[in-house]
Image (spheres, rainbow, N blue to C red):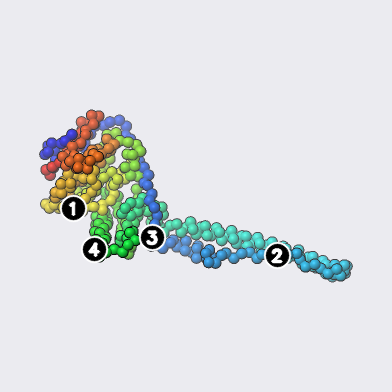
Amino acid sequence: MAATEGEFPRGLHALNTVAEDGPATPSHGGTVTAGHEYDMAIQPTATANAETSNLPETVNNPPAQAPAVSTAPPPAASPSKLGCRSSNSPAVAVVGGERMSVDENREREKEARRERQDRQERREKGEKSSRGRVLGDYVLTKTLGAGSMGKVKLAVHTPTGQKLAIKIVPRVSTNTSGQPLTASQLAKAQAKDASKEIRHIREAALSMLLYHPYICGMREIITHPNHFYMVSEYVDGGQMLDYIISHGRLRERAARKFARQIGSALEYCHKNNVVHRDLKIENILISQTGNIKIIDFGLSNLYNPEDHLSTFCGSLYFAAPELLNAKVYTGPEVDVWSFGVVLYVLVCGKVPFDDQSMPALHAKIKRGLFDSPMWLSQGTALVFNSIFIANPKI
């Protein structure tokens, strides 16, 4: 179905027309796929230092062994001494001396065994403690997820015990080719790193300004010579994408709840002159309380209603036609289009614009051509028709 050009403004006004439809679907998220670990240039925990500093070096200096008990037979006593029956019989002294020597060796062996056990327990405890890494007031633990831009670790704020998520982003690209870079390649790599640096700093600056219940807030950014550590709110659920994959499309009533929350967050951003520009199903989390959290403001920017933006970014399946047509745009309209794609995925279980041919896919997006299933309610169909307008007049 193609929306008539100019028939509706691209907006969120039609959300209240979606009809109620059955019981709400449970809305807790799935599991975020963990990524691979890599070593970070940060110090181990203080407890691990204290415990492991007293341990012996296991590579160069092996643990001290217990005194060996001699297995050689004791020296035989002379016949003359063994046959003597005086009160100071050397035989009794010799035999008694041998018995005391064996007892002492047994005690020493037990003591050495206890030492080895204690040492092993201390070593195991030290290894367990050293799994956490300290970053200022934060102790980093398990990996929550990983991607091309970095990885996300679960962290605990030491003074309060609060759980947080820390996104670890490398500041400098690594040369994986094994060959030295030419001058032009080095210049391109440096320009790319500079662009990434600006993106991450802008993401942190804007995210720390936003305060909304449906936006994942950022607490601070810690700058390291090799990495950025971006400390954010921890969402104890999972990605909305995982939920859709495992449960299929949502009932309209459940989808309307999420639509209102996403719309509320976007309205808040736009009122504060912030445009997200990368809203997609992968950038929405669902907490275990059933509420959404929008994440990843890496492509966000400030906008001026009287001016235009010209950066063409985002994900193809969620991108507005003006981005594919390389036209300048104000900002909010591209977020609203992406919101419509997200809502369509929620209620239909698939993206509205899809084709095996890339040119055909581009053509569908540019013309706003999408399938409207017969089972959609009239109100939901109206929402899609009011959003998927190829040339909005805002």
Q: How far apart are marks 4 and 2 (CA)?
A: 73 Å
Q: Percent position (x, y) of residue 243?
A: 34, 40
Asked if the residues shown at circle 4 and circle 1 are in contact, with their CB atoms under 8 angstroms apart, the answer is: no
Q: Percent position (x, y) of residue 200?
A: 27, 57
Mark closer to the chain start, 2 or 3: 3
Residue at point 13%, 36% (across, down): 4
Q: Check disc 4 and give the amino acid type.
A: Ser
Residue at point 37%, 44% (across, down): 31
Mark closer to the chain start, 3 or 4: 3
Q: Dot 1, how many residues are within 10 Å of its Cα: few (below 14), some (14-19), or many (20+)? A: some
Q: Distance between the residues labelled 1 and 2?
A: 82 Å
For mark 3, what is the residue?
A: 40
**Residue 70 numbered mark, or none:** 2
Mark closer to the chain start, 4 or 2: 2
Mark closer to the chain start, 4 or 1: 4
Q: Is mark 3 on a helix, strand or loop?
A: loop
Q: Is mark 1 on a helix, strand or loop?
A: loop
Mark closer to the chain start, 1 or 2: 2
For mark 1, what is the residue?
A: 311
Q: Check disc 3 and give the amino acid type.
A: Met
Asked if the residues shown at circle 4 and circle 2 are in contact, with their CB atoms under 8 angstroms apart, the answer is: no
Decide if residue 227 is in sight here. Answer: no
Position of residue 122 in the picture relative to residue 323 (left or right): right
